[in-house]
Amino acid sequence: MTTLLPTTARILRARADAEIAANVIAPYYGLDAAIAVNPVLPSLREGMPAALRSAAPALGARGSAGESWYRAQLDGGRISTAELAAAIRAQLASVRGAGGAAMVADTADAALVERFLATSPHEALEAGDPTAPDEIDEQLTRWCRAALAPEAAAWPVPVDELGFYGAWRAVASVDPRMPRSARRRIEEAPAAADAALAAALEATGLPAGDRADALRRELARTPGWTAYVRWRAQTSGDVEVVDLLAVRLTLRVALEMPLPEAPTDARVVRDALGLDAVERALVWQAALEARVHERLLSRVRTAPADETPPAPSAHLVFCIDVRSEGIRRHLEAQGPYATSGFAGFFGIAAEVEPLAASAASAALPVLLSPRYRVSERPVPGAWRGARSLVDRLAAGRAWRSALKAPDSVAGAPLGWAEMTGWLWGPVAASRSILAGAATRGGRADDPVGGPATLFDVDSALSVEDQLATAEVILRTMGMTTPDAPLIVLVGHGSTTTNNAYRTALDCGACGGHRGAPNARIAAAILNSEAVRAGLAARGIEIPAETVFLAAEHDTVSDAITIVDSSALPAERRGELEALLADAVRAAEELQAERAAELPGARTGAGGSRLERRGRDWAQVYPEWGLARNAAIVIGPRSRTAGVDLERRAFLHSYDAEADVDGQALETILTAPLVVAHWINAQYYFSAVDPEVLGAGSKTVHNLVGGAGVLTGPRGDLRIGLPWQSIGTRAGLHHEPLRLLAVVDAPLERIDGIIQRADIVADLVHGDWVVLVAPGTEPGTWVRRTRDGWAPYSLTISTSAAEAAVNPDEKEAA
Amino acid sequence: MSREALTRMTKIEVVARTVDSDAVRRQIVASGASGYTSLPAVTGLGHHGAHEGRALFNDRDALTLTITVVPDDRADDLIEGLRSLLERSTGVMFVSDTYVSRPHYFS
């Protein structure tokens, strides 16, 4: 390796190649505040077919389920001959134009499917080829674990002083396991990461035009750590992909190991119908989706319901999360309640600082940057309770820290285990015997059991800013004329224990945190007299008797907890108690419904059983989260009220008539739709390739600080969802379907937004979502593609859709 | 004040997707530039049609304008470095002569 420093021009060129290469995978947000993301997000613009063709294979992954899995769905009746034939015809028309459609117009469905199936699955799209780790991968992943999650490292490494690459260079150049010649080369490498990368690239002799692709292949060998470093570069900025590549390339040159070879262009195999592997996969995928689309669209009304519902006694606003659909449906069935759906951060773009938390956290969608910070404070007279809570949680943190302290001293963990191991035996035994009996209150953001507090909104936001926030909330929600005396903003959170993926079950719209703080802040703003006066001047009259309350829906137990009722006059407590009594009944009914799907749950079990399940430290299926998500419905509740959408649909309220300028719809399509797609894509890719794009089984996970998990003691950081979020021993519980977006709005308004907002165009034109709107005839739908609107023909009868297979009826964990 | 009293330098402006602008800024810093100015959510009309500013609940999917000023002798390296970066993305770059009154701020 040369000891001459590369020129600035070469360093900047190397940096550019590294930045381009980094787009092989999306950032991974870690587990401290887990966020669902499409793993091939950087390739979104190229579209879903391109993701199957190149973006997923670049990671050694496949972008669709395997042909054998699809064939099993056909054999099992999940896909019908008619659905598959319709998908084949549509695909031929798409890739061959009118000629393609005409080619098989006279062919019967059965014959067409027979021709399609004649191709051997071995010639179709199958799994990618994740390469076995080599010496470079082993060393790099070990270093990533030590440097990026120092609390999990066997001994301290000087990353703070020297940086990721600099510290590695210092350690590796004296590492006795390394050949002497390699140590010398590493010592002679430039001290700065970007210069080292440039020097190593020069040493490889690669032509300049090939370097970005070569670096892309390097990063794809450890997609987990690459994705995590991308996130750190965006946030703390203490490490970037250039550092990762500097270590990789310097090590590769030092060990004289060749660069990963470029894949050879695979021979394109076409089936009897002229379709290649990706086109076949898209046929199967469309056939799989047809029945669910039929099933859901047959239930969503294409016109508002005829009868006007009675005036509600309370109106509850839930997060759009698919888990809210179930509780809304059951609650509405209990009495005169109205419900709405809105992004669960309730428009509060804040960093939230819970009373007993050690730090503030960004409680908003990752699409947004925090605009302000709101702190929780005890109400006057509650200082004693607040002090007690703060002391208790601080003592817990100190205790856990003390227990881990010996880990940072070489050799100490063994002695520590010898000394204290006997203590943990009884503790473990009692936790097992009393599984689920633990009490709540161990989290700073748990709304249950804390002292009386308030969020100090006035210190964070001027009245004018509060007014603007309130107006956005109400207009986007379509609630410009509040219709109930009691309006409850219901966030959500998940109470589980011993669960590395706990935050993945919390509210994604709140940045992977529980939703109660945001609900409380929004309610406080909407109850403010000054804000209401300002709203009235802007045409939004909130009746004086209307009170906003904050609540939280626990998605494990389905319990709804009112977290702040201070705004409700004492004489109106009866209204709240009646609501809560109905909420308990709704939760019981929903628990029974959910228990039928949860592995090992007894369907007759009461609510407390599901709640205990969340607190059982051995339970790997505390809840199903957002599994089986399939659609988002953007429209008034009248389209979906009273129908069962099986907890498969995100529901965002929208009133096209009230949205005169289309601003609310633009907000919904550019944010909640995007987030719903990210979630949908994370589940999709975790299901179609659980090995590369999923996190594997929870049972063999090792936590690496807040970064993520490893399978076993070493290797790449696992991205995506664990198997227990998507399947059981019997197979997939989550069906890998692209998001169906049902938008109840004028077509020209949707078109205008697609034209203006690139992100919406990318989703729709790239076939990442199937966007439909009500057609002009009742009961009909039209679909928007890059070619415009066209009738969306549903291929099967409603009765067949109703008979769609629920895998849990067949599968038992 | 006439331009003779000022120091001539090179101004480089890049309009790129907000998600790509971090890389633009890292490139600027790595070149030795002493700083930059970043304007998020810019609007306009260009090769890919009209671009709206920031959506209400989405800062990410917008365009960001990043501006830096460097001495002429550093400009070419940075220009090439940015050109390389923009080879595979949709950003555009403008380079122009500019004059500054406090050259030591930019050296």
Image: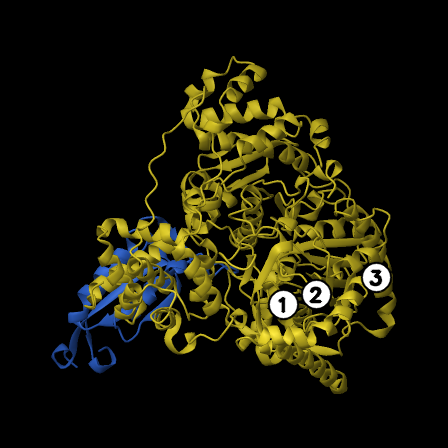
In-front residue for pair A529/A273: A273
Task: Determine if residue B29 is in view.
Answer: yes
Q: Give a yes or no on whether discs 3 and 1 share a subunit.
A: yes
User: Which numbered disc flags the more N-terminal residue, 2 or 3?
Assistant: 2
Number of residues whose C-alpha sits closer than 10 Å to that of mark 1, classed few (under 14), some (14–19) or many (20 or more): many
**Disc 3 designates what residue?**
A580
Q: Is residue A454 left or right of residue A753?
A: right
Q: Are marks 2 and 1 in contact (CB under 8 Å)?
A: yes
Number of residues whose C-alpha sits closer than 10 Å to that of mark 3, classed few (under 14), some (14–19) or many (20 or more): some
Q: Give a yes or no on whether discs 2 and 1 share a subunit.
A: yes
The three-letter code of the residue at mark 1 reads Leu
How much space separates mark 3 and mark 1, taking CA atoms? 29 Å
A152 over A358 or under it: above or below: above
Q: Would you identify the image quadrant in which residue A376 lies? A: bottom right
In-front residue for pair A307/B7: B7
For the colour blue, the matching chain is B
**Disc 1 designates what residue?**
A535
Q: Is residue A481 left or right of residue A209?
A: right
Number of residues whose C-alpha sits closer than 10 Å to that of mark 2, classed few (under 14), some (14–19) or many (20 or more): many
Task: Determine if residue A485 is in view.
Answer: no
A528 over A209 or under it: above or below: below
Which residue ends up furthest to the top in the rendered image?
A106
Q: Is residue A133 left or right of residue A215?
A: right
Q: Quadrant of the C terminus of chain A?
A: top right
**Disc 2 designates what residue?**
A542
Element type at mark 2: loop
